[in-house]
Image (cartoon, helix red, strand yellow):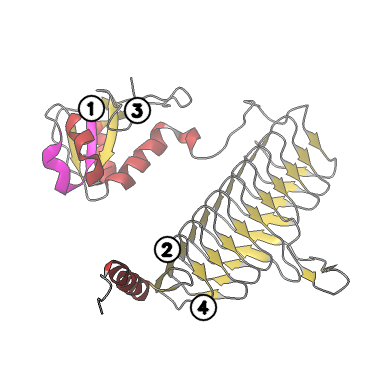
Amino acid sequence: MSGQSPFFTADRSIAASEIASIAGIAFRSKDFSISAGAALETASTEDLSYMDNHKYLDALKATNAGACLVSPRFSAFVPENTFSFVTREPYLIYSKVLALLYPGAASPRSVFETAGISPKATVHGSAVIGSGVTIDPGAVVGPRSNIGDYTCIGSNVVIGPDVTIGRNCSIGAGAILAHATIGDNVIIHPGVSIGQDGFGFVPGSRGHIKIPQVGGVIIQDNIEIGANTTIDRGSTRNTFIGEGTKIDNLVQIAHNVVVGRHCLIAAQVGIAGSATLGDFVAIGGQTGIAPHLTIGDSARIAGASGVTRDIPRGERWAGFPARPSRKFFRQYKILEMLAVRKPRED
């Protein structure tokens, strides 16, 4: 199978009728099996692909995929030898099928294929370790920490004193967790640092006085935190990440920040101290949010924005300084028109 990755092998095949059931599509053809998921360009006759973007129309026309999940507007371009699952949500259904084919790909697992606790891990005698926990070589588990059932701790992870980690969590290699309480079903990717002290100083003419950071970090259930992201502990209150939130790689979340439920935060976002995000907020990459601001529920912020004011609930903002998106793009268009206008001749 040309589309098969050397690092991920499907745990099983899946019947076309099962894919149709997941998609809510009636299936009246002769059943067949799908063995892997693959891109349109590399898929073989036993692979499943998906298509919902016009930029890949040529790839769709030339694909050798055995089957393709395709949105209705592109269904006419599927090759004759490729079976079409026509659905309005091809990417969503494709994701669900991949989760069945590759259940181990969704979160970091043991890099050493450890069973149980490696003898080369260092676990303090007062730590409480649940059933079915995996701890890789080089990991350090500190005093009075508590690790829930079936959680996987990667190589060289450091878990500080009194840290609590819930059930079915996955902690990637090299992550550092201190002064934190982690819920259930949390995925923390490699290199994440949680609970270090925040950036707090009182400026003075003779130097800057460090402010002790005596809060913690609360990570609720079903959260995913991308590689090399940092989440500072609170200064006097806890930094808080609400359930279901998904955080990309290389994000900085400062002390006392409150992030609501089911937020999406893309790579290289920086959220300054004591900012508050409501539920279902989405933030594009490389956006900066100034301290002490409030971002309302379901607000959307475009990438590379600089947020210097509160954003009301449900609004879409863009630009630097950020403003409502329609206003930003209208102003930008006017500037473009001025830039190409011919100079007036006297």
**Residues at circles 3 and 1 in contact by the CB criterion of under 8 Å:** no
Residue type of the residue flagged with mark 2: Ala
Q: Secondary structure at mark 2?
A: loop
**Residues at circles 4 and 3 in contact by the CB criterion of under 8 Å:** no
Q: Which residue is mark 4?
A: 310
In the image, the segment drawn in magenta is: 66-78
Mark identifier at residue 66: 1
Residue 287 location (% of width, % of height): 51, 62
Q: Tell which circle, 4 or 3, labels the residue nearer the N-terminal end.
A: 3
Q: Quadrant of the C terminus?
A: bottom left
Residue type of the residue flagged with mark 4: Asp
Q: Residue at x 66, y 69 (%)?
A: 273
Q: Residues within 10 Å of mark 1 (few under 14, many from 20)?
A: many
Mark identifier at residue 36: 3
Q: Residues within 10 Å of mark 2 (few under 14, many from 20)?
A: some
Q: Secondary structure at mark 4?
A: loop
Residue type of the residue flagged with mark 3: Ala
Residue sticking out furthest to the front: 346
Of 198 and 12, the residue lying toward us: 198
Q: Residue at x 68, y 30 (%)?
A: 116
